[in-house]
Image (tube, grey):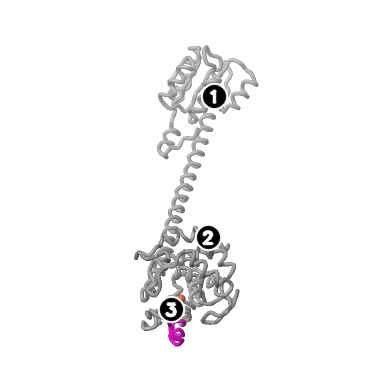
């Protein structure tokens, strides 16, 4: 049994001088009582185990002197029970039987002494003093151990609180960073017809494709967080080009296509991994698998995977949502159109992986649907 006590309770236990004497022979009881009282101990005398148990429940004892052979419950059973239920009470067995077997059994059980009747006063007082000294050492040792455990517990709690705080700060920082990125991206997109939902869909399509393609979880998170900035370079595109509803002239196309380069220049040069990925996506999301994209006409795997992923996600979202110059195409039509450009515009393997997840794609599309009631308008 473990007892957690404060310092003052421990001190009271250390100073306790009350002794419980159990013997069915009254003269022995009285003799033991007299010896101990004359040495300054407080004594309580009882004749059997039942009475002894009642006294032990009433008040604490420093020591119990216990006869072995008594009517009713034996002294050995009483001692065993006391050592288990009242570990702050030391036990000395007192018996008329001088048996080494019994003595060893008593000591093994945890008794601190074994006195054989008839006894000398000195012999009893030496055993009592030894038992109480040993009890004191054990109590002090326990206090020390509990103090140590208390220190460890307090420090562990402080450490846990610090870790919780760090985790919370890190989470807040991450959320605020992601929100800042999204708001910046929305600000850039706000100039044309794209919506905040486009940013959300785009980033989730990118993340979905990255995961299904088998990129690391950390890379997928980076791609999800960074992809909303793919068109941030449009802030450098003049309104008359950006907002033109019809087809671009070759000169206008040259102007609009500069947004990839401008985005890259805005985002590049940082040591932050997220901005490195964002810069890469901004620079390469209009490259084509066959090398006919822009701005650098990169080909195949020379295009970073995040750029190839963003190209698919961006094109798919443009096709399946309404724009000022076109209605939303159905999912099937978008799949057909993009499949025709498999291996030309789009990385064929990535496109297959993307379209193998149509149910997930539909979930994202529906979850972040434009608030204007014009998305996924079935074609007539
Ligand atoms: Fe773009």
Q: Position of residue 35 (x, y in %)?
A: 48, 20
Residue 194 at x, y percent in the picture: 39, 72
Picture coordinates of residue 219, whole percent (x, y): 53, 65
Q: Which numbered marker is on residue 80? A: 1
Residue labelled 3 has its Cβ within 8 Å of some atom of ligand 1: yes
Label 3 vs label 1: CA separation? 84 Å
Task: Specify whether 85 is left or right of 298.
Answer: left
Tell me the residue that label 3 is attached to. 233
Dot 2 corresponds to which residue? 357
Q: Residue furthest front?
A: 380
Residue that appears at 42% across and 68% down: 328
Tell me: is circle 1 under 8 Å from ligand 1.
Answer: no
- Asked whether 172 or 52 is in front, the reply is 172
Q: CA distance from mark 3 to mark 2?
A: 30 Å
Graded by Cα atoms within 10 Å as few (under 14), some (14 to 19) or many (20 or more), the crowding at tag 3 reads many
On screen, residue 314 versus residue 241, left or right, reads right
In reply to whether residue 253 is colored magenta, the answer given is yes
Tell me residue 22's x, y (percent): 49, 18
SS assignment at label 2: loop
- Mark 1–mark 2 distance (CA, rounded to whole Å): 70 Å
Of 370 and 115, the residue lying toward us? 370
Magenta stretch: dominant SS? helix
Comparing labels 3 and 1, the label whose residue is closer to the camera: 3
In which quadrant of the rendered view does residue 92 lie? top right
Q: Which stretch did the figure color magenta?
A: 247-257
Query: Callout 1 environment at 10 Å: few (<14), some (14 to 19), or many (20+)?
Result: some
Say which label, 3 or 1, has the lower sequence index: 1
| Mark 3 or 2, nearer chain start | 3
Ligand 1 within 8 Å of the CB at mark 2 = no
- Name the element at disc 3: helix
């Amino acid at each position: 049994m473990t007892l957690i006590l404060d310092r003052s309770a421990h001190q009271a236990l250390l100073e306790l001088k009350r002794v419980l004497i159990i013997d069915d022979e009254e003269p022995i009881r009285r003799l033991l009582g007299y010896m101990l009282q004359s040495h300054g101990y407080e004594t309580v005398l009882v004749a059997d185990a039942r009475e002894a148990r009642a006294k032990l429940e009433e008040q604490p004892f420093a020591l119990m002197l216990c006869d072995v052979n008594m009517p009713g419950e034996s002294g050995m059973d009483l001692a065993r029970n006391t050592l288990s239920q009242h570990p702050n009470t030391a036990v000395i067995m007192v018996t008329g039987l001088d048996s080494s077997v019994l003595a060893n059994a008593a000591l093994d059980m945890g008794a601190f002494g074994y006195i054989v009747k008839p006894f000398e006063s000195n012999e009893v007082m030496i055993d009592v003093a030894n038992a109480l000294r040993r009890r004191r050492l054990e109590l002090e040792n326990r206090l020390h151990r509990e103090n140590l455990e208390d220190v460890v517990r307090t420090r562990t709690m402080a450490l846990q609180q610090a870790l919780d705080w760090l985790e919370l700060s890190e989470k807040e920082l991450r959320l605020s960073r992601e929100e800042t990125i999204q708001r910046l991206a929305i600000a850039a997109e706000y100039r044309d017809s794209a919506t905040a939902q486009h940013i959300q869909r785009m980033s989730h399509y990118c993340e979905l494709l990255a995961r299904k393609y088998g990129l690391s979880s950390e890379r997928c998170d980076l791609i999800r967080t960074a992809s909303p900035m793919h068109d941030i370079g449009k802030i450098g595109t003049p309104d008359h080009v950006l907002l033109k509803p019809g087809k671009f002239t070759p000169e206008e196309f040259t102007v609009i296509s500069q947004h990839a380069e401008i985005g890259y220049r805005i985002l590049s040069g940082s040591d932050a991994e997220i901005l490195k990925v964002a810069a890469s996506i901004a620079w390469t999301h209009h490259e084509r698998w066959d090398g006919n994209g822009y701005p650098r006409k990169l080909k195949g795997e020379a295009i970073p995977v995040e750029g190839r992923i963003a190209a698919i996600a961006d094109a798919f979202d443009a096709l399946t949502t309404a724009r000022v110059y076109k209605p939303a195409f159905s999912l099937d039509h978008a799949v057909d159109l993009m499949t025709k450009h498999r291996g030309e515009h789009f990385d064929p393997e990535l496109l297959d992986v993307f379209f193998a997840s149509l149910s997930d794609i539909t979930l994202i599309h529906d979850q972040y649907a434009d608030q204007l009631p014009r998305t996924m308008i079935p074609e007539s």
